[in-house]
Image (spheres, grey):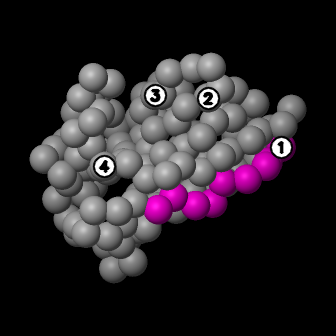
Amino acid sequence: VQLQASGGGLVQAGGSLRLSCAVSGFTLNRPAVGWFRQAPGKEREAVSCLSTNNDITYYPDLAKGRFAISSDSAKNTVYLQMNNLRPEDTAVYYCATDLGQSSSYALCHKRPANWGQMNWGQGTLVTVSS
C-alpha cells in the first residue's frame, strides 16, 4: 500500500489549491481515505475524510464550506480542493487510509494512538501567506 501526496505550494490568503494523492496497492471502492495536516508545533489533525464505497464525506469545522474531498477510482487518486485559504491552514498535508475502515466519520475521528494502523503518504507542504 502506497500513497503519494502532491500539489502543495505557496498561496496567498483567499487563494485556492488542489492536492492530489496517488494511491496503489488497494482500490478506491471500499476503504475510507482522508487528509490530515500538521502545522509547526501542533498536533496532527483530520481535515477531510471520504468513504470510497458510498462517497459519504466528513469535514471537521475547520474545513466545512472551504474544503472538498473527492476521488477518481479510474485514476487511483484522491483529491483535496481547498478554497479561501487562511494563514492558519499552513501545514504539511498528509493523505492516509485505513484498509479496515470504510466510514469517513470513523476515519476522521480515529484516535492518534491508533494511527499506526493506518497507511500514510509522505506529506506535501502548504504555505498560506497573509
What amino acid is at disc 1? Gln
Residue at x-position 52% and y-position 36%: 37
Between 113 and 15, the one lying in front of the other is 113
Disc nearer the start of the sequence (1/2): 1
SS of the residue at dot 3? strand
Identify the residue position indicated by label 1 in the image: 12
Identify the residue position indicated by label 4 in the image: 119
Identify the residue position indicated by label 3 in the image: 45
Measure the C-alpha gap from mark 2 to mark 3.
Answer: 9 Å
Q: Is residue 16 left or right of residue 29?
A: right
Question: Which numbered marker is on residue 39?
Answer: 2
Report the span colored magenta.
4-12
User: Are the residues flagged by discs 4 and 3 in contact, CB closer than 8 Å?
Assistant: no
User: Is the residue marked by circle 3 packed among few (<14), some (14-19), or many (20+) residues within 10 Å?
Assistant: some
Quadrant location of the C terminus?
A: top right
Q: Is residue 8 rendered magenta in the image? A: yes
Disc nearer the start of the sequence (1/4): 1
Could you tell me residue 50's position as x and y percent?
32, 49
Could you tell me residue 83's position as x and y percent?
65, 46
SS of the residue at dot 4? strand
Disc nearer the start of the sequence (2/3): 2
Between 8 and 60, the one lying in front of the other is 8
Measure the C-alpha gap from mark 4 to mark 3.
Answer: 15 Å
- In the displayed structure, 41 sits above or below 102; it is above
